Amino acid sequence: MSALTMLWVGMGAAVGAPLRYLIDRAVQARHRRRFPWGTFTVNIVGSLLLGALTGAAAVLPAPVSAAAGVGLCGALTTYSTFSYETVTLLENRARVTAVANLAGSVIAGLLVAALGWWATRTLLT
């Protein structure tokens, strides 16, 4: 990976990380329930965006793919927080909520990534 590509990734991450925090806090503040809606939201949005970027990969310049795909989406989405929140739910005996978070995040993430890919491919062909 070139130094310029790493710079593009870093610039995308510099946008994605604070965006994740702001979206997570804004969404979670509106939901006073156990379910981690903030993390769920950023992961779904990131999956949709990465699916769309993947669908457009053939026409996107490499710096855009690096900045948006690896940098922005990598910093926006958060597997570690998703895992931590799921384990915390299990520790707090909220098993149904933990399973809903696990299954919902994986299934919805895959579905919206596929939707993003399909929509972008459809628009570009």
Image (tube, helix red, strand yellow):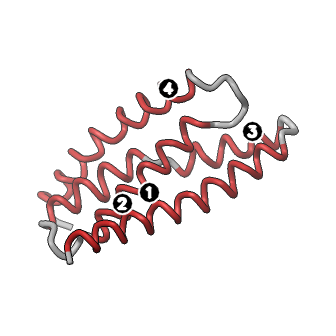
Label 2–label 3 contact, CB within 8 A: no
Q: CA distance from mark 2 to mark 3?
A: 27 Å
Q: Nearer the viewer, residue 51 or 9?
A: 51
Q: Nearer the viewer, mark 1 or mark 3?
A: 1
Q: Amino acid at mark 2?
A: Leu
Where the C terminus falls, by quadrant? bottom left
Identify the residue position indicated by label 3 in the image: 88
Q: CA distance from mark 1 to mark 3?
A: 23 Å
**Picture coordinates of residue 78 (x, y %)?**
50, 47
Q: Amino acid at mark 1?
A: Ser
Identify the residue position indicated by label 1 in the image: 47
Whichever of labels 4 and 3 marks the residue nearer the N terminus, that label is 4
Left or right: residue 23 compared with residue 80: left
**Picture coordinates of residue 14 (x, y %)?**
27, 39
Left or right: residue 122 compared with residue 46: left
Q: CA distance from mark 4 to mark 3?
A: 18 Å
**Callout 4: 10 Å neighbours few (<14), some, many (20+)?**
some
**Callout 2: 10 Å neighbours few (<14), some, many (20+)?**
many
Q: Nearer the viewer, mark 4 or mark 3?
A: 4
Name the residue at 55% across, 40% down. 39
Name the residue at 33% across, 66% down. 119
Determine which of the numbered discs, if any, sits on residue 112 in the image: none
Q: For numbered disc 4, what is the local secondary structure? A: helix
Label 2–label 1 contact, CB within 8 A: yes
**Picture coordinates of residue 19 (x, y %)?**
36, 35
Label 2–label 4 contact, CB within 8 A: no
Left or right: residue 89 compared with residue 57: right
Identify the residue position indicated by label 2 in the image: 50
Determine which of the numbered discs, if any, sits on residue 25 in the image: 4
Quadrant of the rendered image containing residue 103: bottom right
Q: CA distance from mark 4 to mark 1?
A: 19 Å
Q: For numbered disc 3, what is the local secondary structure? A: helix
